[in-house]
Image: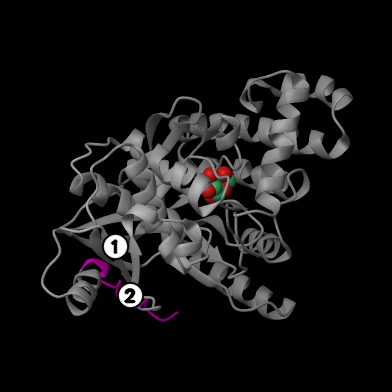
Amino acid sequence: MSAPPPPRDAAAAALRAFSEAFGGTPDGVWRAPGRVNLIGEHTDYNEGFALPFAIDLAAHVAVRARADRCVRLLSTHGGGVVELDLDSLSPDGAPGWAVYPAGVAWAVAERGADLPGFDLALDSTVPVGSGLSSSHAIECAVATALSELAAADLGPEDLVLVTQRAENAFVGAPTGILDQSASLRGTAGHAVFLDCRDQRIELIPFDADAAGLAVLVVDTKVAHSHAGGGYAERRAACELGAEVLGVAALRDVSSDDLAEARALLDPVTFRRVRHVVTEDERVLATVDVLRSEGPAAIGPLLDASHASMRDDFEISCPELDLAVEAARSAGALGARMTGGGFGGSAIALIPRAAEAAVRDAVSAAFGRAGFGAPDLFTVVPAGGARRVL
Ligand code: GLA
């Protein structure tokens, strides 16, 4: 196995890109990480529980306030400088990745903040489209920066809502609060046990390394999008389920209620509901097991979560299923797709000693199936959004 390349210094890259494009130095550089969700998928918009962690891959933005109402945006991923007018921001006018910073600026301004125009350069180490929240990493870095530049004094919980508003109303993705909660509120060495009903969090120690384990990400490179399509359909099914069952949100249904629910719901809606209800319970069980036995014992819960997403919620795909199966057969303690589904990444909890075997097995299985080669890398829980320069 060849040694991985040294991590790119994204703060320095953003700084360099800023000076080249706009001249001089920025007012600061802010960073926000991507996330892996350990367990608790599609529970967030059902006011349930999730257990994500911020990862050691992050978006960095170098930003400088301007004296006028102009917004200039540059990404090291290409596309050149995008120029916008702060007072007429619209999704149609923000091409490509610019929709994320534009959406956040729009949502910060909507809060009544006195936001100045700004120049911004982005560099990110979160692989785009990997299902590791590359877009939320950008949004959270920008929100943290703009809140400071506008002296808006928004705390992490406000920033969670600002970025969710940007996603829902500007980007057009009807997503919940999972990703930004991890990115804004994560802490090194911990998973974020999140109650999506009231944004309460508890930091749960998650030190896989100390237990001789690692979290391996398998990025299938299968493209997915949450702006429309399957994600919105799943959300609508959950809302229908809650309405028929007469509860505020599926968070209020327990597995004891499922027999009754089956009689009231059409078969597809029932399976969507069963996923959410059992997934909430798996999150609570995972937190208990982490506390009592440690990370090595959570494998079966990860496996059950994947099965539920594959069979009941139907958001997996052949590449994700293969990644999970191949990792498990080669020694992973548990594995599941992570994030919204329909593509993106799977995670596998593996003994360090089995890392090479699992990597080889997954790559070989993809080759045999005729799938494109996946990207494989390990992640650890890292700190949340902050100013770095
Ligand atoms: C995406 C969304 C989140 C959440 C997950 C599924 O990542 O952005 O809000 O719904 O899917 O758990």
Q: Name the residue under label 2.
A: 81
Q: Residue drawn 31% across and 54% down?
A: 142
Q: Residue drawn 41% across and 64% down?
A: 98
Q: Which residue lies furthest to the left in this view?
A: 24
In the image, 121: left or right of 169?
left
Looking at the rendering, the stretch of residues picked out in magenta corresponds to 1-11
Which x, y percent locates residue 229? 69, 54
Q: Residue drawn 61% across and 41% down?
A: 42
**Whether residue 150 is situated above or below residue 135 in the rendered picture:** above
How packed is label 2: few (under 14 Cα within 10 Å), some, or many (20 or more)? some
Task: Specify the quadrant that holds the C terminus.
Answer: bottom left
Q: What element carries label 2?
A: loop
Q: Which amino acid does label 1 sit on?
A: Val
Q: Say if the magenta span includes residue 337.
A: no
Instruction: Give the color scheme: rainbow, by chain, secondary structure or one colour.
Output: one colour
Q: What element carries label 1?
A: strand
In the image, 58: left or right of 96?
left
Q: Mark 1 points at which residue?
A: 71
Task: Indicate if the residue with disc 1 has its beta carbon within 8 Å of ligand 1.
Answer: no
Q: Say if the magenta span includes residue 6.
A: yes
Which x, y percent locates residue 327? 61, 62
Prevailing SS of the magenta stretch? loop
**Whether residue 18 is situated above or below residue 68 in the rendered picture:** below
Q: What residue type is labelled 2?
A: Val
Task: Indicate if the residue with disc 2 has its beta carbon within 8 Å of ligand 1.
Answer: no
Say which label, 1 or 2, has the lower sequence index.
1
